[in-house]
Image (cartoon, rainbow, N blue to C red):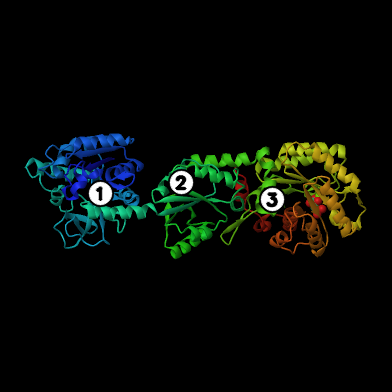
């Protein structure tokens, strides 16, 4: 597409303002002239070829355009007869350069980005009009019929609307008009507007009237016009635009959206907090503080703020932006309630939502897939539990005992109240790992096999892993376990203060179980902490005093001793339905130690919600066995149904459809 800017005229109504240069060089803001603004906007819109007709002070104008050093291919066409002709003759002089689709504008026209965007977005040919502005006395008006411009001139008042000489012209339509211009000029009719030639076509050029309503699109004829335009531009410059980003990698798609948003005003970027990002997609690779710096360093970003929640309400009410910009991918799906709220808030604050088509470019999807793959790498996965604890205060973990349950924990999301809930981490339980292998939970499944389970889970997931290390075994063995787990990218091992043949805690005192001494167990923790190589890895001491009915004082004494020995976290366990003893432990432990994370496994005491545990000072909630307990009755039922019916048909309704199971795992 070529842009044609008509700049031959004298601009005599501008008085002294045009005594030394053509009108288009009049300053409209501290940094811009009419022409520099037009050229920059055309360049930003992706137009490279520009034809400028000149006449009055042509050399000054040409030198000026060169001095702007814009990446444009500008051709100047001099109208030597500028004093005696109108711009119809300038177009005639330039005709050989105008065979392409065209954006045609007068050189004294000032418009805002959205005006130009709308013009360029027109499918066919168009001319800008305004149905909201009053009909001007002396300036252009357009007679419109059925949305198509029939006549343009200053003399039409009936069925006319205010019009501006900003056109987008398709090649074929423009050819019709240009032929008439040529005919006019070659018959000596060169002192009229080019629109006089257009009017002879009676609408056949098929130029749609594009109503830009109150958007800025105004010509500057005299000092009053100039003052009004300057005031409008100031107001436009002070407009603010808000966009929120959760990404930690900025790719071309994001930059393209940012460029569009910048055209609307001063761009404020909201960087979604780590907690909010983690709550609805995956844990960010780059922390919010660093993401803020990334955006601050993008040219043209005016301010960067944090957006603490998925909801925009707080930031929109505080910042009151004129526009919010977003991709149109949130019109449906789980983000819809967030969008609805944005619309409601903007209705209160008087702002507007602008949505651009979402570009699901495979190139960008690949980048996202690579980001995900990075999250699975041991170095990145291991430290994420500590970061989640710091960011969220309370972390939830669900048991996984193989790749399939790992995928369920990784991918299950519940959208609720405009938010998204998912598990933060995975628990590789000794009970479930043993049960899945048909073995009792007595440290019979050896470490090699347990590591194999971790590996299966890790291969298909990215969330941090908490490993149930049973008693940790002999201290001499435990140090190797720590290093292996750390190397694999596991985030935390929990070891329980029992010794000898370990049985599952939920048996309580029904079976013989021996608690280790504080001294021995502290030594094991110390040895483990000395063995680890990174700062990320965590060793959690699990206290069995309440399970073994040794009392609260014993539990607390152990908790403080094990923390002293270097434990990064304390797990307190109970097999009572009543949460009272856990609540008491939390209260008394927190009186002395506000910081060490506390881990709970509320299998028996399951009535308390996560929010309440958080308020009471707990930090990790482990759902230790629910997935395997859900699976066993379901598979038993299917097995029984087949046995009862001597065929599988009756059991089909209990099953996941065959088509779904073969597609469950992406290949
Ligand atoms: C496990 O899941 O293996 C545990 C928790 O250790 S519990 O079964 O409650 O002892
Ligand atoms: Mg266990």
Specify few, some or many for label 3: CA neighbours under 10 Å numbering under 14, 14-19, or 20 or more. Answer: some
Residue 634 vs residue 101, the one in the foreground:
101
Residue 307 vs residue 593, the one in the foreground:
593
Rendering coords of residue 243 (x, y %): 48, 52
Instruction: Say which element carries label 2.
Output: strand
Tell me if 277 is positioned left or right of 37 in this view.
right
Instruction: Say which element carries label 3.
Output: helix
Q: Single out the residue that lies furthest toward the front.
A: 16
Residue 649's place in the image compared with 475, above or below, is: below
| Count of marks overlaid on the render | 3
Q: Which residue is mark 1?
A: 109
Tell me if 638 is positioned left or right of 564 in this view.
left
Q: Residue at x 87, y 37 (%)?
A: 476
Q: Single out the residue that lies furthest toward the left.
A: 187
Foreground tag (1 vs 3): 1
Q: Which residue is mark 3?
A: 389
Marks 1 and 3, how far apart at CA: 57 Å
Q: Residue at x 78, y 57 (%)?
A: 590
Q: Residue at x 45, y 43 (%)?
A: 255
Question: Could you say which quadrant of the image residue 447 lies in?
Answer: top right
Question: Could you say which quadrant of the image residue 606 lies in?
Answer: bottom right
Specify few, some or many for label 2: CA neighbours under 10 Å numbering under 14, 14-19, or 20 or more. Answer: some
The reply to whether residue 194 is visible in this rendering is yes
Q: Which residue is mark 2?
A: 301
């Amino acid at each position: 597409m070529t842009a044609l800017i008509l700049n031959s005229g004298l601009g005599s109504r501008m008085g002294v303002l045009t005594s030394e240069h053509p009108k288009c060089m009049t300053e409209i803001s501290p940094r811009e002239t009419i022409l520099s603004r037009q050229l920059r906007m055309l360049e930003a819109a992706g137009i490279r070829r520009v034809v400028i007709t000149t006449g009055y002070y042509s050399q000054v104008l040409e030198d000026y355009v060169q001095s702007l050093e814009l990446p444009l291919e500008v051709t100047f066409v001099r109208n030597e007869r500028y004093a005696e002709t109108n711009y119809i003759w300038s177009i005639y002089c330039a005709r050989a350069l105008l065979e392409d689709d065209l954006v045609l504008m007068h050189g004294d026209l000032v418009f805002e980005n959205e005006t130009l965007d709308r013009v360029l977005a027109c499918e066919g040919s168009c001319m800008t009009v305004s149905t909201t502005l009053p009909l001007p006395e002396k300036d252009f008006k357009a007679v419109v019929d059925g949305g198509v411009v029939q006549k343009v001139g200053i003399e039409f008042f009936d069925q006319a609307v205010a019009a501006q000489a900003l056109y987008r012209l398709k090649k074929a339509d423009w050819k019709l008009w240009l032929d008439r211009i040529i005919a006019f000029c070659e018959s000596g009719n060169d002192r009229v507007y080019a629109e006089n030639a257009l009017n002879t076509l009676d609408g056949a050029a098929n130029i749609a009237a594009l109503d830009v309503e109150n958007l800025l699109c105004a010509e500057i004829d005299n000092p009053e016009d100039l003052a009004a335009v300057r005031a409008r531009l100031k107001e436009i410059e002070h407009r603010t635009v808000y966009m929120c980003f959760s990404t930690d990698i900025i790719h071309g798609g994001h930059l393209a959206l940012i460029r569009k948003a910048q055209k609307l005003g001063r761009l404020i970027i909201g960087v979604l907090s780590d907690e909010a990002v983690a709550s609805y997609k995956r844990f960010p690779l780059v922390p919010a503080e660093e993401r803020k710096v990334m955006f601050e360093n993008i040219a043209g970003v005016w301010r960067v703020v944090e957006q603490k929640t998925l909801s925009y309400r707080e930031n929109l009410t505080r910042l009151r932006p004129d526009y919010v910009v977003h991709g149109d991918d949130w019109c449906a799906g789980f983000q819809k309630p967030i969008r609805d709220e944005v619309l409601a808030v903007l209705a209160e604050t008087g702002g507007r939502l602008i949505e651009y088509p979402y570009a699901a470019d495979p190139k960008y999807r690949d980048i996202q897939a690579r980001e995900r793959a990075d999250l699975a790498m041991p170095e990145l996965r291991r430290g994420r539990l500590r970061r989640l604890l710091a960011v969220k205060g309370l972390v939830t973990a669900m048991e996984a005992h193989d790749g399939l349950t790992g995928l369920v924990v990784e991918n299950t999301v519940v959208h609720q109240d405009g938010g998204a809930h998912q598990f933060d981490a995975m628990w590789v339980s000794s009970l479930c790992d043993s049960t899945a292998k048909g073995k009792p939970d007595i440290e019979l499944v050896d470490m090699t096999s347990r590591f194999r389970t971790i590996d299966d889970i890790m291969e298909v997931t990215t969330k941090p892993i908490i490993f149930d290390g049973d008693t940790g075994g002999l201290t001499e063995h435990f140090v190797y376990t720590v290093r292996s787990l750390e190397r694999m990218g596991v985030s935390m091992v929990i070891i329980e203060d029992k010794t000898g043949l370990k049985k599952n805690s939920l048996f309580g005192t029904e079976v013989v179980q021996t608690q280790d001494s504080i001294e021995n167990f502290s030594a094991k923790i110390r040895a483990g902490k000395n063995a680890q190589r990174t700062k990320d890895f965590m060793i959690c001491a699990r206290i069995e005093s309440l399970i073994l009915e040794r009392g609260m004082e014993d539990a607390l004494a152990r908790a403080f001793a094990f923390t002293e020995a270097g434990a990064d976290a304390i797990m307190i366990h109970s097999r009572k339905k009543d949460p009272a003893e856990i609540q008491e432990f939390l209260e008394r432990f927190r009186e002395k130690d506000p910081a060490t994370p506390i881990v709970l496994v509320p299998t028996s005491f399951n009535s308390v919600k996560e929010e309440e545990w958080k308020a009471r000072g707990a930090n990790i909630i482990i759902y230790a066995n629910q997935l395997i307990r859900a699976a066993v009755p379901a598979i038993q039922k299917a097995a029984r149904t087949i046995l009862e019916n001597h065929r599988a048909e009756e059991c089909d309704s209990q099953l996941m459809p065959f088509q779904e199971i073969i597609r469950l795992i992406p290949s």
